[in-house]
Image (tube, rainbow, N blue to C red):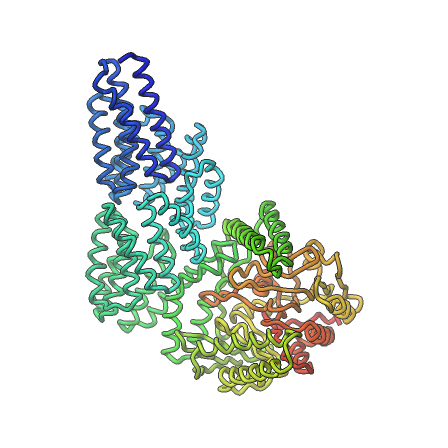
């Protein structure tokens, strides 16, 4: 065959091969395999008519195609099918004695071993490939180093991994290989994740996506980011990212990645307590891995299945043997972290079976707590050790394990600068905190219950607040969000604007996602304060002549501890927590209904009767066992109890009440010094009485007071007044977003101000009054971590926030608030002033304002 014809066939094969590689890098292995086979056929048609001088050139091209086909076929049909193609390339490389091809064979065999879970064998192959780096292109050097870096990640050799990945990123950047640079940066992010630096991990992964102009990380990036989010406690967000990744992997027949995604979603389901879903997902993933011959991942799926079986309450005697077998297999593969988890699961199963000695042996095999283990694994270790101690009668030692574990959780939360992540990561400590509280309740000691509650309650309030640096990109996104929300305001009620409304909602959701993700990359202060002691609480109560009522829940049981300077006592609430939550929901619905001026008179009577009945029931259920004498009452609620309009309960009429997330937070807020300063009243748009209310409030304070109304009541002016004011009153529409609480907002002249934006304001007033609907509500997560506009203001340093836990009629709010300021200006504490203003209001519906944080008193020169 003429040389030019041979050259054409080689070039055509190379062109098809290159297209196949591109398809594979975009996550489309089926298309890649078809193109690779066409490339092979192009050369096979001329193989019989070649002269000797052309045979070597054709053989080299054939080997390259077989190498690529090995990888794409392994993705589609499993590593055994890929090994068949790889053997063809191996034989060619040896026959023609070609070092570059030898290196590529070692590299691809290493990759196939990774996919099969044979990590030690994979590292050996990649070591051989790296030893031949001088014979390969810059692209293949990046490929070998990146893959060896990934293997060392899995094997726990993080130092070697970091060296390989950093070198790969540098080589790729120098050679202009954007896809490989993006991959190396992404994997460096995953390395940061394994090192426990989650903000750095998310930041690196974000940079990788920015570099990845070709979209090669399209499926892998959401999968690995979701793993980071799971560790951060953002379970819902992780599952959403995994759903996106699963759709991509399923569409492109990427069975291995799809199985890994299903397994990660199973972990999400475990964290949310959805055991049936967790078991179904893990079972599906195990089947996929088994079909592919991926033993390492099959074992990972079985590990999650075991956790699901334990959560489902299956007998421990049946679960311990497979857990111990799995631990042995994982150790043999060099997967020490997963092996430790299997040993801990075996110990948990043996404890359930009553075999304490064997459980202790299994826990000992798991070894000590390691600083480089994920927080979930560390807390699991502390939980098992605590349960073993308690089962063996060493209760004091068990409590010490619990305290150490919960302190590690607080340190973990302190790594985050984002309030979002600080609060979300509490999910990992739920089982440990529940066990701590159950021990305390079993002891019957009030002091023990208070201490257990404080250890796990609202830990984020014990962390040093860190304001992130100014970020122009985030500021731009917030401006876009504000404009989009405002543009949607009128359209949502227009039945003909359906498509526009759907598009607008999608845009809002996407902007919120981008803003949150940028906030997640902020590092925290790294420090957390200790919970306050019982003597410290009693001393503060004595100084304030106050009583504290702390609620705790265990399963569906609710308990209340009353603390006074003279001591503490505990009572069990006689109704289940679920019934209490149901009543609170009814109360809020009734209050919202009565705030509607258009509610017919007859229906208003029915709703009013329902509200009075629920308030009486709640009053008797929660407070009936206690003899409250009218002193200031500091309430530490749990879960939905934070949404109760406490001063509307009959027995608390006229009683000063403060609601605080924890006793520790209350003592901290008490320490905020009140100074004589400006009192500013801001009026937002769309409220008929807002400007009159703002003017009246400012007038109460005389020369200290000022009102901000009309067009000047905008974002810039509001921020300036936050910094300058000691007291800030806001008469504006407010909205709490239950699913995205940090996007709860106040509507100003130029659009909504979001809770997310408060971290860019250098100072917040000592006392803030949100005379707006429902801004006292919070989304409460594990560990009683509450998020909403009120909680964010308290987080950034406000001593006291007065806000509503339901809607309130505009005229009623204005009347009560002006009266409240008259009392406050005379030096009355905020808790007493609010209680008296609500009690003296002669209206048809109760006023659902609550005093949050700690009681505020105006400085003597303020009145």
Q: Is residue 376 left or right of residue 604?
A: left
Vertical comparison of 589 with 295: above or below: below
Vertical comparison of 699 with 485: above or below: below
Q: Position of residue 678 (x, y in %)?
A: 74, 63
Q: Position of residue 343 (x, y in %)?
A: 25, 58
Q: Position of residue 540 (x, y in %)?
A: 56, 75
Q: Is residue 595 left or right of residue 275?
A: right
Seen as rendered, the residue at the extreme right is 703
Identify the residue at horizontal 73%, vertical 68% (top origin). 688
Q: Is residue 691 visible?
A: yes
For the image, the number of numbered tags is 0
Quadrant of the image occupied by residue 78? top left
Quadrant of the image occupied by residue 401? bottom left
Q: Position of residue 3 (x, y in %)?
A: 30, 12
Asked whether 265 or 424 is in front, the reply is 265
Q: Is residue 131 visible?
A: no
Vertical comparison of 589 with 201: above or below: below
Q: Is residue 679 left or right of residue 760?
A: right
Quarter of the image with the C terminus in it: bottom right
Seen as rendered, the residue at the extreme front is 496
Quarter of the image with the N terminus in it: top left
Asked whether 357 or 693 is in front, the reply is 693
């Amino acid at each position: 065959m003429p040389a030019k014809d041979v050259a054409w066939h080689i070039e055509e094969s190379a062109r098809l091969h290159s297209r196949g590689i591109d398809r594979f890098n975009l996550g489309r292995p089926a298309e890649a395999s078809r193109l690779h086979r066409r490339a092979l056929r192009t050369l096979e048609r001329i193989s019989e008519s070649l002269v000797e001088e052309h045979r070597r050139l054709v053989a080299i091209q054939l080997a390259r195609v077989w190498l690529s086909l090995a990888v794409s076929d392994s993705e589609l049909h499993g590593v055994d099918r890929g090994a068949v193609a790889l053997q063809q390339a191996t034989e060619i490389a040896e026959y023609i004695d070609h070092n570059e091809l030898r290196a590529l064979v070692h590299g691809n065999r290493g990759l196939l071993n990774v996919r099969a879970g044979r990590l030690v064998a994979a590292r050996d192959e990649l070591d051989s490939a790296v030893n031949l780096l001088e014979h390969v292109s810059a692209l293949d050097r990046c490929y070998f180093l990146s893959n060896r870096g990934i293997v060392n990640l899995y094997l726990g050799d993080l130092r070697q991994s970091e060296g390989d990945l950093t070198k790969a990123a540098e080589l790729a950047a120098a050679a202009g290989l954007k896809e490989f640079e993006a991959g190396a940066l992404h994997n460096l992010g995953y390395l940061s994740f394994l090192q426990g630096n989650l903000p750095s991990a998310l930041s690196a992964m974000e940079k990788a996506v920015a570099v990845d102009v070709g979209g090669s990380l399209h499926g892998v990036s959401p999968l690995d980011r979701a793993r980071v989010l799971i560790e951060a406690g953002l379970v819902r967000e992780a599952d959403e990212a995994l759903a996106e990744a699963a759709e991509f992997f399923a569409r492109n027949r990427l069975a291995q990645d799809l199985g890994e995604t299903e397994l990660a979603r199973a972990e999400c389901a475990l964290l949310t307590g959805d055991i049936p879903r967790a078991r179904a997902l893990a079972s599906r993933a195990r089947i996929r891995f088994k079909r592919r011959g991926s033993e390492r991942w099959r074992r990972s799926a079985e590990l999650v299945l075991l956790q699901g079986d334990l959560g489902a309450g299956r007998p421990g005697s049946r679960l311990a043997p497979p857990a111990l077998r799995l631990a042995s297999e994982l150790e043999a593969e060099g997967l020490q972290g997963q092996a430790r988890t299997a040993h801990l699961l075996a110990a948990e199963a043996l404890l359930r079976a009553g075999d304490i000695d064997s459980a202790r042996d299994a826990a000992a095999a798991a070894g000590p707590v390691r600083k480089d283990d994920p927080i979930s694994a560390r807390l699991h270790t502390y939980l098992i050790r605590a349960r073993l101690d308690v089962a063996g009668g060493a209760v004091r030692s068990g409590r010490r394990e619990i305290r150490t574990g919960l302190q590690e959780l607080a340190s973990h939360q302190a790594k985050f600068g984002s309030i979002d992540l600080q609060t979300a990561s509490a999910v990992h400590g739920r089982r440990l905190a529940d066990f701590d509280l159950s021990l305390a309740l079993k002891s019957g000691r009030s002091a023990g219950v208070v201490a257990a509650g404080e250890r796990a309650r609202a830990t984020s309030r014990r962390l040093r607040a860190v304001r992130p640096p100014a970020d122009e990109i985030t500021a731009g996104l917030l401006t876009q969000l504000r404009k989009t929300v405002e543009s949607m305001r009128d359209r949502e009620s227009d039945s003909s604007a359906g498509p526009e409304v759907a598009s607008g909602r999608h845009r809002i959701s996407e902007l919120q996602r981008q803003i949150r993700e940028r906030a997640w990359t902020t590092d925290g202060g790294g420090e957390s304060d200790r919970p306050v002691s019982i003597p410290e609480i009693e001393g503060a109560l004595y100084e304030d002549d106050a009583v504290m009522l702390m609620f705790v829940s265990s399963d569906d049981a609710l308990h209340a501890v009353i603390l006074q300077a003279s001591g503490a006592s505990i009572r069990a609430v006689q109704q289940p927590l679920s019934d209490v939550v149901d009543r609170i929901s009814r109360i809020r619905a009734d209050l919202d209904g009565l705030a509607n001026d258009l509610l017919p008179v007859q229906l208003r009577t029915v709703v009013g009767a329902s509200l009075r009945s629920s308030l009486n029931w709640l009053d008797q259920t929660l407070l009936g066992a206690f003899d409250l004498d009218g002193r200031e009452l500091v309430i530490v609620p749990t879960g939905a109890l934070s949404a109760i309009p406490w001063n509307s309960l009959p027995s608390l009429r006229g009683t000063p009440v403060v609601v605080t997330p924890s006793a520790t937070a209350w003592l901290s807020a008490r320490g905020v010094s009140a100074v004589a300063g400006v009192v500013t009243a801001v009026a937002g748009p769309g409220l008929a009485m807002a400007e009159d209310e703002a003017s009246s409030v400012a007038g109460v304070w005389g020369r200290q007071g000022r009102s901000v109304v009309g067009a000047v009541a905008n974002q810039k002016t509001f921020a300036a007044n936050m910094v300058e004011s000691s007291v800030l009153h806001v008469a504006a529409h407010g909205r709490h977003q239950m699913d995205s609480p940090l996007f709860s907002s106040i509507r100003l002249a130029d659009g909504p101000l979001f809770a997310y934006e408060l971290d860019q304001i250098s100072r917040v007033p000592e006392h803030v009054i949100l005379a707006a609907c429902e801004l006292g509500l919070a989304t409460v997560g594990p560990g009683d971590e509450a998020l909403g506009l009120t909680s964010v203001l308290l987080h950034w340093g406000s001593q006291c926030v007065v806000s509503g836990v339901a809607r309130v009629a505009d005229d009623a709010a204005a009347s009560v608030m002006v009266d409240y300021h008259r009392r406050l200006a005379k030096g009355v504490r905020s808790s007493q002033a609010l209680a008296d203003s609500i009690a003296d209001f002669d209206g048809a519906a109760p006023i659902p304002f609550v005093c949050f944080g700690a009681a505020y008193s105006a400085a003597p020169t303020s009145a």
